[in-house]
């Protein structure tokens, strides 16, 4: 167990070297990260390790700081910042930089490279518009070890499955034994440098776009303010800054202002900052999956839904109709395919729960979904709040539609199919829902 005075010493050391702030509730994290270093060096426990740190072992200090930095990253993380890059930032820059034809992008705290490589893949989709341009992507990180991994561009099956669309895996990666390596063409678009965000930024040069995502959350407020101020000094009036979803400049820095109606993307708070057209992105956001699919068909960039949420055309399926269409995962809304809700009063209710047949003419299908609160062929008695469950035998009622199975409660008429009654659970014995406290 780490002594309080040892924790204070190590936490101060880490903050001075990396800006990372460790509170007392992170003692367990510090111990779990440092014990492997102690074992590797043949030290008996953390007391001996901390004694070596106090002695000024520089290599050990680097190892400790490296162990404490979080290297969590994945391709197209959070999706939205990459949609904003493609539909807002790049079109704006291509138009405004037409005479200079030069674009520089900085990915601060780039970790194992998924973020800069994600941007490089999007830029490759714009290679026609960017023909003749000089585009640079600089990825920096404090960890020498993680930068070695980033340069190699080698990722496990798990890593490529986190956020990377399958069509991009096929297009830009090659299988290397049990790993996947991103193509040399994409790797060549990114330069990696070891860099500490507490150091002077000026040697890095000017950047038009800066991604500094999920980094500031580990700093205290004065450090956040300082980092944002120094980033702003690197950027032209029409530059863009991207922060993580849990990060903001509000109340921390007056150097940036949020881009109108868009979260996570910021402009310089200067008179020269231009008006930026976000209408194309807003249309895509409003249109949903159909617009994304259309964008992909025309050479754009889209993030498809999982297969179980798509139909043959790439859109979201409905849970009704004939054939074997696979329905989307049920939600809490009413309608076919939704989770069951208890319904009382008048009207017609029913279900399409786990049917053995679908369609309006009784044709066989294979649609399976959870019970719905609305539909046709409902069951239930007038004013009864109890729930009756029946297992379907696969026979068709007089309407030729789905045989009743696990119906929602409520009033309405029932179909004339054959069912085998199962158990009946009467909730009235336990009291009505409104009686619960």
Image (cartoon, rainbow, N blue to C red):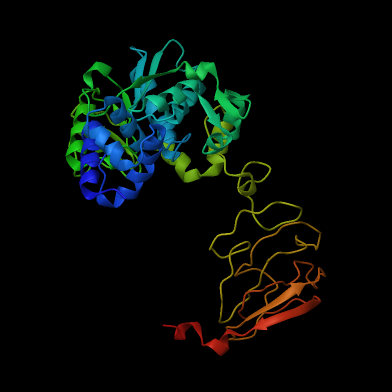
Q: How far across and down, in percent of the image, does residue 100 sit?
A: 33, 12
Residue 430 visible: yes
Q: Is residue 212 above or below residue 172?
A: below
Left or right: where 24 falls relative to 277:
left
Q: Say which residue appears at 57% left-offset and 89% top-offset.
A: 429
How many numbered discs?
0
Q: Say which residue appears at 58% left-offset and 35% top-offset.
A: 157
Residue 259 visible: no
Q: Is residue 382 above or below residue 328?
A: below
117 and 365: which is toward the camera: 117
Q: How far across and down, in percent of the image, does residue 123 sit?
A: 46, 22
244 and 18: which is toward the camera: 18
State the image quarter where residue 363 is shown.
Answer: bottom right
406 and 215: which is toward the camera: 215
Q: Residue furthest top?
A: 132
State the image quarter where residue 297 is shown.
Answer: top right
Q: How far across and down, in percent of the image, does residue 345 sit?
A: 56, 82
Q: How far across and down, in percent of the image, does residue 382 sit?
A: 62, 86
Quarter of the C terminus within the rendering: bottom left
Q: Residue furthest bottom?
A: 429
State the image quarter where residue 202 is shown.
Answer: top left
């Amino acid at each position: 167990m780490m002594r309080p005075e040892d924790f204070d010493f190590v936490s101060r050391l880490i903050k001075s070297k990396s800006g990372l702030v460790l509170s007392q509730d992170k003692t367990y994290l510090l111990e779990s990260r440092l014990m492997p270093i102690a074992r590797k060096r043949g030290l008996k426990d953390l007391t001996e390790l901390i004694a070596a740190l106090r002695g000024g072992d520089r290599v050990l200090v680097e190892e400790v700081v490296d162990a404490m930095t979080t290297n969590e990253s994945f391709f197209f993380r959070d999706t939205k910042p990459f949609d904003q890059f493609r539909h807002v930032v790049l079109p704006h820059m291509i138009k405004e930089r037409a005479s200079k034809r030069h674009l520089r992008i900085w990915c601060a705290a780039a970790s194992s490279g998924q973020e800069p490589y994600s941007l490089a893949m999007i830029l490759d989709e714009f290679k026609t518009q960017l023909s003749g341009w000089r585009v640079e992507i600089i990825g920096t990180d404090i960890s020498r070890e993680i930068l070695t991994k980033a340069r190699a561009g080698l990722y496990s099956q798990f890593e490529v499955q986190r956020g990377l669309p399958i069509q991009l895996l096929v297009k830009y990666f090659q299988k290397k034994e049990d790993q996947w390596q991103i193509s040399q063409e994409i790797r060549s678009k990114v330069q990696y440098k070891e860099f500490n965000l507490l150091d002077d930024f000026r040697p890095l040069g000017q950047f038009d776009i800066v991604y500094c995502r999920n980094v500031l959350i580990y700093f205290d407020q004065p450090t956040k303010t300082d980092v944002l101020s120094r980033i702003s000094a690197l950027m032209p009036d029409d530059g863009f800054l991207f922060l993580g979803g849990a990060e903001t400049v509000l109340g921390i820095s007056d150097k940036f202002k949020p881009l109108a109606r868009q979260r996570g993307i910021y402009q310089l708070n200067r008179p020269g900052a231009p008006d930026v057209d976000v209408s194309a992105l807003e249309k895509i956001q409003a249109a949903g999956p159909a617009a994304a699919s259309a964008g992909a068909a025309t050479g754009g960039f889209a993030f498809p839904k999982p297969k179980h949420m798509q139909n043959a055309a790439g859109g979201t399926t409905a849970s009704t109709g004939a054939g074997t269409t696979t329905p989307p995962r049920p939600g809490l809304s009413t309608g076919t395919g939704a989770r069951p809700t208890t319904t009382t009063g008048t009207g017609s209710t029913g279900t399409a729960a786990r049917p053995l047949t679908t369609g309006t003419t009784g044709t066989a299908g294979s649609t399976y979904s959870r019970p719905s609160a609305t539909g046709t062929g409902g069951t239930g008695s007038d004013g009864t709040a109890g729930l009756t469950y029946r297992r379907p035998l696969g026979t068709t009622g007089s309407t030729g539609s789905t045989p009743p199975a696990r119906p929602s409660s409520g009033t309405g008429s029932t179909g004339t199919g054959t069912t085998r009654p199962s158990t009946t659970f009467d909730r009235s014995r336990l009291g009505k829902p409104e009686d619960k406290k």
